[in-house]
Image (cartoon, rainbow, N blue to C red):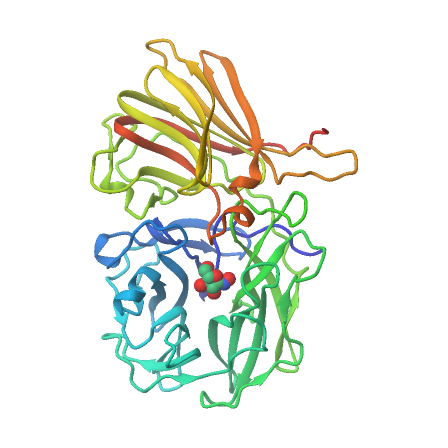
Amino acid sequence: MTASEPILAGFYPDPSICRVGDTYYLVSSSFEYLPGIPIHVSTDLVTWTLVGNALTRESQIAEHRGYPSAGIFAPTIRHHNGTFWIIGTNVNDIPLGRGHFLIHTSDPAGPWSDPVHIAGAIGIDPDIVWDDDDIAHVTWCSLNPEQPGIQSAPIDTTTGALLAPPRQLWQGSGLAFPEGPHLYRIADWWYLLLAEGGTERGHAATIARARTLDGPFEAAPHNPFLTHRSLAHPVQNTGHADLIELADGTWAAAHLGVRPRGQTPGFHVNGRESFLVGIDWIDGWPVVDETRFAVPPVDRSFADHFAGSDLHPRWLGVGRFPASFTRPRTGGGLLIDADAGEGRALIAARATDLVWTASAQFTAEAGTGRFLLLIDDRNWYGLTYDGSTVEATLAVGPIEHSVGRHDIPAGVVPTLRIRAIPAPVLPHGVSLEPDLIELAVIVEGAERVFGAFDGRYLSTEVTGGFTGRVFGVQALTGQIELREIHYAPTAESASTA
Ligand code: 6LW
């Protein structure tokens, strides 16, 4: 058996993991969505709880706009001398010469500090590690043409200043795009783990080691030590890994992977997810054991009535914090204001299951709202309600097309429903689509289904990008009052064509 279940389902890529005692902490990339960098906590490595986000305030995001798949890339989390550190990149900072950001806290649930920027380190995927003299070293994938490749430099963590010129470390095993470095001090070695091959089907993790940071780095004889490239495995694109020593002295690695479905080339829809493998050290090298951890089924359903004053950390805005355009209503519900500031007034959560049902109820007496499933700003399927009519729309790239309308009687609040349902299986055993997306409205118990539409147009293989599907409610004009959003996985049963 190999692990086909993610430990974090939905768009949680580039996992980085650390441990304090018997508690584990995991961070993920969040791109254009804010709050940024979700923080998950676990005591068994296979079941995780979202406890907050690291980037929760304007002062932490010097420059952040909602460009698809820009924003926050590949953070690293580490615990050192009683303090948690996250180092990451906001790619919108790169043209401004700001470099990576470093934040810290004593409580991973937050709040996290304001950032220190490392202007001498321009690139992506930074890592931080402390040497035997307690000096912090930052290692990153450089985008500076004068300092190409995987670079590393000691830094002052209070100012972000480099303490020595960057030096090139190992540049990988020769596959495309050596990136995602993690540097570890283990026994008397420095190990450098890289992501290689690009984050698509050729993705892999490789490793090398050296006695000192000056090298020479010796590549592992069995590189790539983690990959599913060219294998008929339901989990593909595996790579971008981080090693972790468990409380009992054994080892594991978190890594990203995707679950493509449908006909060739296969379409993954929920983004790059986080997976876990066991690690054995053999002759001083990490060797993957895919069978070590059984990931139990997790119920990821929720019903949110927006009753408290704080939004659950699952809710995201696109390039802006939800608090800047939402207000809790006394007695429950959330006012979403399309006129509050610049940008989209959308709150959204990650789709996490392969087959699921989500529904929303909002009133639209002073505006127009939309319940939608999207993968980016140009690709979405949604239900728009203006107080009297619900219209179902598909947006695929430059084409936006209405697929039906339904009048809503006065005084009734419709339930808008989106389902990801299994694609039909053709007689030769193949499904063309990864799934179908069904759009429906329910009025006083009567259901009007507008249709079930090919899910591939909301997949990464079609739209490109680093994220996955999210669903949520947007105020398009004026103000709407969101009463509730429900989400639940549905029992998976494939239909036949
Ligand atoms: C990340 C890079 C990668 O910076 O994808 O899979 C990029 N690896 O290391 C964005 O997540």
The one nearer the camera, 412 or 368, is: 368
Please state if 430 lies on the left or on the right of 367 as rendered. right
Considering only vertical position in the picture, is 12 above or below 249?
A: above
Q: How many numbered discs?
A: 0
Say if residue 21 shows up in the picture. Answer: no
- Residue extending farthest to the right is 428
Say if residue 161 shows up in the picture. Answer: yes
The one nearer the camera, 84 or 333, is: 333
Q: Residue at x 34, y 38 (%)?
A: 347
Q: Residue at x 33, y 10 (%)?
A: 411
Please state if 315 lies on the left or on the right of 14 as rendered. left
Considering only vertical position in the picture, is 138 above or below 427?
A: below
The picture places residue 275, in percent across and down from the top left corner, at 57, 56
Considering only vertical position in the picture, is 173 above or below 86?
A: below
Q: Quadrant of residue 219?
A: bottom right
The one nearer the camera, 465 or 81, is: 465
Q: Quadrant of residue 409?
A: top left
Please state if 470 lies on the left or on the right of 227 as rendered. left
